Amino acid sequence: MKMIYLDYAATTPAHPLVLRAFKHSLLTYPGNPNSGHELGQLSAKAIEQSLKNMRRALKLSKHYELTPTSGASEANNLAIKGIAFLNANQGKHIITTSFEHSSTIATANYLSQQGYQVEIAPTDHYGRVDVNLLEKLITPDTILISICSVNSEIGIRQPIAEIKDMLKRHPKVYFHVDATQSIGKEQLDLEGIDLISLTAHKFFGLKGIGLLIAHERVKLIPLIHGGHSTTPVRRGTPATELILSMERALKLALKQQETGYQHCRTLNDYARQQLKRLEGIIINSTLEDLPHILNFSIIGKNSRDTVTYLSNRGIYISNHTACESDTDYSSGIYALTHDRARAESSVRISLAYLTTSNEIDELCRALKEYI
Amino acid sequence: MKIILFTAIWCPSCLIMRPRYKELIKNDSQTTLEEVDFDDHPDLVKQFKIGNILPVAIVFNNQKQEIKRIVGEVSSKKLAVMWLEL
C-alpha cells in the first residue's frame, strides 16, 4: 500500500542533507561544549557560529540571542513563564488568543491557576485578532502578549506586523510570537518582536531541537537550572549535532520557501475544488489562511473515525493538533464556529513541496467512498 | 451549593470561563468552586458523563443533587442570569 502523507503541519520527514549535517557534526564535534578543553571549545565555537548563521538567515539584528531548546513547546513555556515569573511585580496580566498551540494555552492555564490574569483577545469571524480591540485590553498590569503567527489547525494568519506597530505605543508590554508554523513556509518580519519560538521538525529538520529567540532587552528566568553553560537561559549540555542540523534545515527551508509556498497555494486551491464536490463537507480554512493547511468538516462523521478510516488506507491526516488532547473534538474549530457538529467532525490536511495533486485525488476518492 | 468545574489545561474556553465562575461566586460565601482536571480524572469524567465540549460546570445543591449543568463558553451576563434562576 502506497503511503500518502498529508500531515506536514504535525511533523516533516528529515531532509537527507539534514541527516548528513547531523552525522558530520556528531563525528566532527564529539566534545561537550561546556568543557574547558580544546575539543569542548571546538563544539562551543561551532554552536556559536551556527546560532549566528541562523540569526542572519532569519534576517535578525545582532540584538537577538538564540537559545536552543527541545522544541517549540519548551520555547513557548520558557518565553511565557520566563516573562511572567520575572515581571510578576510589574503586573500579572497576559493576553493571548483561542487559536494558540496547546503548549501556549496550557502554560496560560497554568499561570491562570497561579493567580495571573489571562485574557483572550477578541478575534473576527475568521479567527484573526482585531488589533484595535487588542490594544483596548492592555492595562498598566499587562506584561505580555503571546500570539502565534499562524494557527496550526486552521492556518489562520495573525496580523503580527500590525500588532508589532501597535505595541510601539506600549513599550513595557513584551511580545511573544510562536512562529512554528510560519518558518520556512512564508516570509515573516521577525525584527522588533521580543520573543520568537520555532522548532526544526516543522521544516524538514529533526525532532528534539528548537529555538527561543529573544531580544537583548528581554530578561528571562530559566526553567532548566544547572551549572555553567554556553546557553545561560537553558542550562545543560547543548546538543551540538542537533543545533548544526537545524541550521542546515533552516537554510534549506528558507531557500525553497517561495516555490514551496506557490506549490501549496496551487494544491490548496485544487483540494478545495475537489472537496467541495463531496457531500457534507464544509471547508473551515479560508483563502486568507496559510495555504499549507486546509481544515474541513465532514458533517455527521466523527473526526477520529475519519482519521482512522483514512489511516487504514495509508492516508495520514490529523483531526486536531497532534499535541492536544485525546478527545475527538477540535477546540480551535469550536472557538471559531461555536458549532459542535463542525468541531466534532473537523479534520486537517497539511501540505508541503512533496505533496502531489495525485495524492489529493487519492484522498478525495477515499473520502467519497467513506461519505 | 457547590460547583464542580471540569477543565483541561489545553482548553482555551476553560481559560475564559475560570475567572467568570470565580467572579460569579465571589460574594457568595455559601457556594464553593472545585476544579477537576479532565485528563487527570477519567473516572469522574465517566461518572458525570462529561462530553467533548469543555468546560463543564455542574451545580449541586446542599442535598448533593445536580441542579444545573453549564457546558462551554457562556457570557458573564448570561451566567449571572442562569445563577439567579437557580
Image (tube, rainbow, N blue to C red):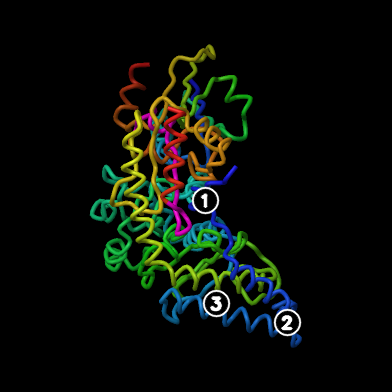
Q: Circle 1 is placed at which residue position?
A: A10
Which amino acid, mark 2? Gly
Instruction: Give residue A138's mark.
Output: none
Instruction: Give residue A51's mark.
Output: 3
Q: How many residues crowd mark 2 within 10 Å: few (<14), some (14–19), many (20+)?
A: some
Which amino acid, mark 1? Ala
Which amino acid, mark 3? Leu
Q: Tell me, yes or no, whether the highlighted magenta stretch contains residue A340.
A: yes
User: Magenta segment range?
Assistant: A338-356
Does residue A115 show up?
no
Q: Nearer the viewer, mark 2 or mark 1?
A: 1
Element under label 2?
helix
* The C terminus of chain A - image quarter: top left
Q: Nearer the viewer, residue A52 or A20?
A: A20
Q: Nearer the viewer, mark 1 or mark 3?
A: 1
Q: Tell me, yes or no, whether the highlighted magenta stretch contains residue A371.
A: no
How far is mark 1 from mark 3, CA to CA? Answer: 25 Å
Given the image, what chain letter belongs to the residue carrying mark 3? A
Query: Between disc 1 and disc 3, whose residue precedes?
Result: 1
Circles 2 and 1, Cβ within 8 Å, touching? The answer is no
Q: How many residues crowd mark 1 within 10 Å: few (<14), some (14–19), many (20+)?
A: some
Q: Nearer the viewer, residue B74 or A128?
A: A128
Q: Circle 2 is placed at which residue position?
A: A40
Apparent side of residue A230 relative to residue A144 in the rendered image (left or right): right
Q: Position of residue A310 (x, y in %)?
A: 52, 36
